[in-house]
Image: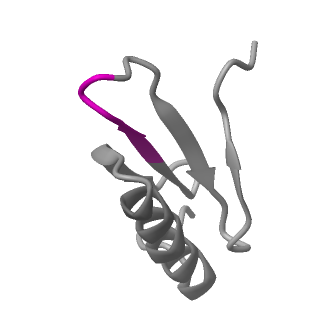
């Protein structure tokens, strides 16, 4: 059965990731917990820079950028 809420490690990692993005003046456009895959997704960017930063945060608290991956 999928977890309905993120883990504590995941929640703390999400705060750190969002703080990091904020420190670099990146607007957060999407913050979503996918309870099927148990992953937090964050999409951020700026108004002048069309490139978005896409991040997945896993239950362990580890995260990775998923930009430009095929």
Left or right? Give the position of 16 relative to 33: right
Left or right? Give the position of 38 relative to 22: right
Name the residue rendered at 71%, 49% in the picture.
64
Left or right? Give the position of 4 relative to 16: left
Q: Which residues are magenta?
A: 42-48
Front position in the image: 53 or 1: 53
Residue 47 percent location from the top left of the image: 24, 27
Left or right? Give the position of 15 relative to 28: right
Residue 21 percent location from the top left of the image: 44, 56
- How many marks on residues? 0
Name the residue rendered at 48%, 47% in the picture.
41
Name the residue rendered at 42%, 73% in the picture.
5
Is residue 27 magenta-colored?
A: no
Q: Which residue is the extreme one toward the bottom? A: 8
Residue 22 percent location from the top left of the image: 36, 61
Front position in the image: 56 or 29: 29
In which quadrant of the rendered view does residue 7 lie? Answer: bottom right
Q: Check the picture and name the quadrant holding the N terminus.
A: bottom right
Q: Check the picture and name the quadrant holding the C terminus.
A: top right
Residue 51 percent location from the top left of the image: 46, 21
Is residue 46 magenta-colored?
A: yes
Front position in the image: 60 or 30: 30
């Amino acid at each position: 059965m999928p977890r309905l809420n993120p883990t504590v490690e995941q929640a703390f990692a999400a705060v750190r990731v969002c703080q990091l993005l904020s420190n670099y003046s990146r607007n957060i456009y999407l913050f979503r917990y996918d309870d099927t895959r148990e992953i937090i997704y964050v999409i951020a960017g700026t108004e002048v820079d069309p490139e978005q930063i896409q991040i997945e945060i896993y239950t362990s608290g580890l995260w990775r950028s998923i930009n430009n991956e095929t």
